[in-house]
Image (tube, rainbow, N blue to C red):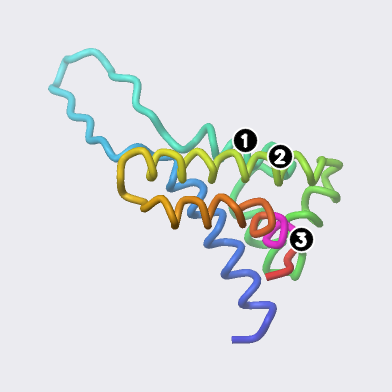
C-alpha cells in the first residue's frame, strides 16, 4: 500500500471509529402505534466533526483525503480552527476511553497508555503525519 492510500485509510478509519464510538449499544423496539422514543445516535458527534471541518458530509472528507489533503488542510480551507478540531476529537475519544474503563472492558494499564498518547495520536492524524 502506498503512503497516500495508508493515510487515507487510516484517517477514514479514525473518522469511522469516532462516529461509531458515539453510538450506544442499546436496542430500541417499538410496537405499532406506540409513541416515538428518542434514540441516542452518533449524528451529533458526526455533525460536530463536520462543523469543525467546515464540510457537510463524509463524502467531502473522503474526497479531500483521497486528493491527498489532511484534515488540517480541509479545516484550513474552510476557515476552521484546526486546534478546535483536535480538541473535539480528543474529547470524543477520551469520553469513549472513560466509558470503556468504567465498564471494565479496558484494563487500567491500557487506559492510562491510551490517554497518555491520545492528543499526539489525534494531532498526527489531523495533520496527516501517520
Q: Position of residue 68 (x, y in %)?
A: 75, 70
Q: Position of residue 96 (x, y in %)?
A: 46, 43
The label number, if any, that marks residue 127 in the structure image: 3
Along the polypeptide, which appears first: circle 3 or circle 1?
A: 1
Q: Quadrant of the N terminus?
A: bottom right
Q: Which residue is mark 2?
A: 52
Please state if 31 lies on the left or on the right of 18 as rendered: left
Q: Residue furthest front?
A: 109
Q: Which residue is mark 1?
A: 48
The reply to whether callout 2 and callout 1 are in contact (CB within 8 Å) is: yes
Q: Quadrant of residue 110?
A: bottom left
The reply to whether callout 3 and callout 1 are in contact (CB within 8 Å) is: no
Label 3 neighbour load within 10 Å: few <14, some 14-19, many 20+ = some
In front here: 32 or 30?
30
Q: Position of residue 37 (x, y in %)?
A: 29, 19
Q: Closer to the camera: disc 3 or disc 1? A: 3
Q: Is residue 36 above or below residue 21?
A: above
Q: Position of residue 109 (x, y in %)?
A: 44, 56
Amino acid at each position: 500500500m502506498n503512503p497516500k492510500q495508508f493515510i487515507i485509510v487510516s484517517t477514514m478509519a479514525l473518522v469511522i471509529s469516532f462516529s461509531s464510538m458515539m453510538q450506544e449499544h442499546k436496542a430500541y423496539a417499538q410496537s405499532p402505534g406506540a409513541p416515538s422514543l428518542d434514540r441516542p445516535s452518533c449524528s451529533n458527534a458526526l455533525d460536530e466533526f463536520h462543523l469543525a471541518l467546515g464540510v457537510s458530509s463524509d463524502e467531502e472528507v473522503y474526497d479531500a483525503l483521497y486528493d491527498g489533503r489532511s484534515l488540517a488542510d480541509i479545516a484550513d480551507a474552510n476557515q476552521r480552527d484546526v486546534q478546535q478540531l483536535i480538541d473535539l476529537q480528543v474529547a470524543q475519544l477520551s469520553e469513549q476511553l472513560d466509558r470503556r474503563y468504567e465498564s471494565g472492558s479496558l484494563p487500567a494499564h491500557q487506559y492510562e497508555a491510551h490517554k497518555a498518547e491520545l492528543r499526539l495520536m489525534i494531532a498526527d492524524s489531523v495533520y496527516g503525519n501517520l
